[in-house]
Image (cartoon, rainbow, N blue to C red):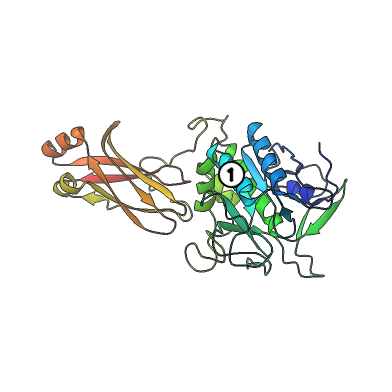
Amino acid sequence: MPQDGDGHGTHVAGISSAVTGNGLGVESVAPGAAILPVRVLGNDGRGHTADVAAGIDWAVARGAHVVNLSLGSEVPVSGGGASTFDDAINRALDAGVVVVAASGNRGTPACGQPSGQGRLLCVGAVDRRASRAFFSSFGRGLALVAPGGSAFPFVDEDVWSTYKGSSYAEIAGTSQAAPFVSGVAALLVSTGLRGQDVTQRVLATARDLGPAGPDPEYGAGVVDAAAAVAGLHPASAGPGPPGGPAVSPADAPAADGAGVRVHLKRVQSLAAVRRRGIVVRCLAAGAGRCTVTALVGRTAIARGSGKVQPGRLTTVRAKLNRRGRALARTARKLSVLVRVKLPGSPAIKRRLTLR
């Protein structure tokens, strides 16, 4: 394993995946996750963008599902060109890898890792009071926040984790916030989710902070591991769909995830549905598509989808197909199951009566 003379990388790795239950040190977010250590910085904590880019490509080529980039103002990188770094990130994203990056410790209104075209999880830091840490960069590009300490002296509010050798240390920074999110991403990978499904699930289940909805200080909110994995099964376990999320019982008013809402009138007019389709209003915490499928028994009678943006209510119309139109012409009343899929959320099911 590469030796970490600086200690920063060991500290970050311990937050996400340190061994748990051994009576030593700290507990991590995803102790069952395997760490693929990639040495890209020197013992002075500095390095070059070309080396970081090469490290990203190396990890992706060897099957990494999550790449954590705790590289900010306290871990400077230089040389090699920004495009080299951006291209490596985009290659990882295109390969279905979750990329998590620290927002930076400059306290400026922009994520320190602006690449990824909105697909990267840029993570800011909050203190133990769930307030944005003064050093945490925010604003443009921020996806969400996680615990990162306060950096106030003599108050013991920073993040404890593994350090050089067999020691432990307390450090504050967005570098420490990022691996909390990477750990949650690893938990989601263990359920069978991959890539942007993981990213959107993390955003959709974040606990809202500040003004309602996504905002420049906290993004989608603070990462919530329990909410992220709620209702999901390990990929190797059963029952439940292999490698995928569990769905709510068909007849139950399934609880929507944090930041995810589905509005559907439980009774709709057959005549109106023939003309306009089944109307569903979707609210998602992440960008993507709201996909609606309506079924009678096991037969799909209507489908529709529409683009959704974080925090914006979008109307989607599921238009009747040939089978649906035939049923709508002859039936006086139809009991329909409507299945709605939103970015990062398990399928949400609703019952609908057409008459």
The answer to whether residue 41 is above or below residue 104 is above
Q: Position of residue 162 (x, y in %)?
A: 81, 49
Q: Could you tell me which secondary element the residue under label 1 belongs to?
A: helix
For the point 51% across and 43% down, the residue is: 196
Name the residue nearer the viewer: 290 or 232: 290
Q: Is residue 72 left or right of residue 5?
A: left
For disc 1, the marked residue is 87
Q: Position of residue 344 (x, y in %)?
A: 48, 46
Residue sticking out furthest to the left = 330
Q: Position of residue 35 (x, y in %)?
A: 72, 38
For the point 74% across and 39% down, the residue is: 37
Name the residue nearer the viewer: 337 or 324: 324
Name the image quarter holding the N terminus.
top right
Name the residue nearer the viewer: 70 or 116: 116
Q: Position of residue 329 (x, y in %)?
A: 11, 38
For the point 16% across and 37% down, the residue is: 325
Disc 1 residue crowd, few under 14, some 14–19, many 20+, Cα 10 Å = some
**Residue 60 seen in render:** yes
The answer to whether residue 192 is above or below residue 208 is above
